[in-house]
Image: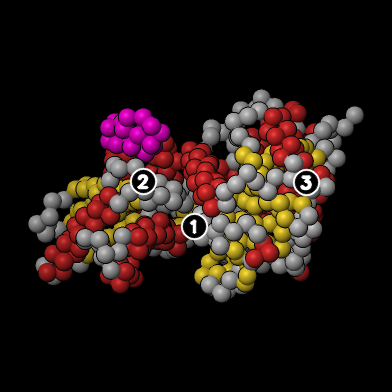
Amino acid sequence: METEVLLDAGAVSRCRRRVHLEADPAMRGVPLAPPDPAAEQRIADAAAHREVIRKRLVEAVPGAGWVTVPRDLPAEDRVRVTERALADEAEFIWGALLPPDREGHRRGGAELLVRSDGGYLPVLVVRHRVTDPGTGAVTTPPTVLDPGRAVVDEERKVRSHARDQLRLAHLRRMLQTLGRAAHRPLGGVIGLDADVVLWHDLAAPTWPGGRSALTEYDSRFADRVAVALAAANGEPELAEPSRVLECRTCPWWPTCEARLRAERDVSLVVRGEDAMELRRAGVSTVDKLAALDPADEPPVAWTSGPFGDAVALARAWLADLTVVRRVPEVTVPRGDVEVDVDMESFGESGAYLWGCLLSGVDIGVPQGYRAFATWDPLPTVDEARSFAEFWAWLREVRERTLAAGLTFRAYCYNALAENRWLFGSVERFAGRPGIPSRREVQSFVDSDEWVDLFRGVTDQFLCARGKGLKVIAPVAGFTWRDPEAGGEASMRWYRDAVGMDGGVPDDTQRERLLRYNEDDVQATRVLRDWMSGPANAIPYMGDL
């Protein structure tokens, strides 16, 4: 007897191996990786965002047409409430959980179902932006849930979010099974800004190759059902493990990692499609890749930079080397006066801490670590104060350095994060006391004074185990004082530090965050000193 398999919409975007593991009865009870604090925070933020939108919509469209399905009910009760609302032809059903489609192997629900065009349309409420400046998106105002009033938006274009469209397609198929789908294959999305309802035509040829979202969904879902059914019924595996970007936050990664390491799988050093192509060509292990000549043409169509780098990475992995030089001599820009900068943010809510480490020639500003923080829960206007104080201090250090005829450098690790909140703070708090102009910030970011050490590492090293600061700085001899130090853990510490969950703000967690931030800037300083000399003693890729 075939084991029942029910998949949610996420299965079509999920790693095929994860679909297999979740359906395999033999994997029940296997230890998983601990929950990702950042992911847990995103889930909590999304729930809060949905509740804000629900209240806004109910207030804007009052009347008896609303049915809310409580999320705290057992799943069976949520389904019964949803079925009753569908039978009563309610205008709007919030929090709907549809009955399982056992024949189609589907389960799922929608933030909102809207009665329209002879049935129901699904509407998602998500916590990411769904449009960009441009033209061509089909939208209605944020509280207008009637696609019949939608127009082509002259100010917005669709931001690509394949998962949204695939989830809408999943819900449409479920509604069709129930005989409750609207005639037109439409679905709506309300995003982070909640400034419009974006309407997708799920049958339109908007995907690569002229496919529609429904066509793409049907193909992917059929594949995932086959993978899950094979796993559930003990049949030969249709999805083997391979390291991909998703692995970093997947709870099943310990299981997959153990098998990949045991097999010395090539995806441990080469990811994605390139790893799959190498396997097809018989280069299935790190050992086989390391044995190739880096000067030769790759044996497959190659997309991941120089093929010789991949061979060198494989050789570094076999030699248990975290990094090797890809250049004959490692260099890093230095200054007479140097500042290491590290920013701490909380999701999309803002940057609550700018930490700085001043070193070098004495210019009359106290050297050492300095933190500019707000401990009001984000989002808060007090963030403008802390940012303005940080920028005023940085400006003073730069001006004093220039006045003394000295050179200045400021360092960070991966400027994408710092730059995002430099410009984001300027835009959100423009006009408040001490907030610089965008031009001033742009001038600094574009100058030689702002140095991204991550870029220096990327350009000058091959990193067999990743390029994160927590991986690279220990090679330079640095150790964090807190054994749990990491961006994900800091999210949890921050919640306690500001009493975000209704508790009393925890001063010990504030101290922990400051110590963690201080260690981060100390780590970049140690890394910079190492790159200025000792790093040239590590193996060169050409010598492996």
Between marks 2 and 3, how big is the CA–CA gap?
Answer: 39 Å
Residues under numbered marks 2 and 3 in contact, where contact means CB atoms less than 8 Å apart: no
Residue at 12%, 55% (x, y): give it. 365
Tell me residue 406's x, y (percent). 16, 67
Tell me residue 162's x, y (percent). 65, 57
Q: Quadrant of the N terminus?
A: top right
Residue 208 vs residue 441: left or right?
A: right
Let me know if residue 452 appears in the view: no
| Front residue of 48 and 89 | 89
The chosen color scheme is secondary structure
Tell me residue 232's x, y (percent). 80, 33
Describe the element under mark 3 as helix, strand or loop: helix
- Residue with the mark numbered 3: 174
Residue at 52%, 49% (x, y): give it. 59
Q: Residues within 10 Å of mark 1 (few under 14, many from 20)?
A: few
Describe the element under mark 2 as helix, strand or loop: loop
Let me know if residue 171 appears in the view: yes
- Residue with the mark numbered 2: 378
The answer to which of marks 1 and 2 sits earlier in the sequence is: 1
Residue at 71%, 29% (x, y): give it. 76
Between marks 3 and 1, how big is the CA–CA gap?
Answer: 28 Å
Magenta highlight on residue 445? no
Stretch of the chain drawn in magenta? 493-511
- Amino acid type at image mark 3: Met
Residue at 33%, 37% (x, y): give it. 498
Describe the element under mark 1 as helix, strand or loop: loop
- Residue with the mark numbered 1: 193
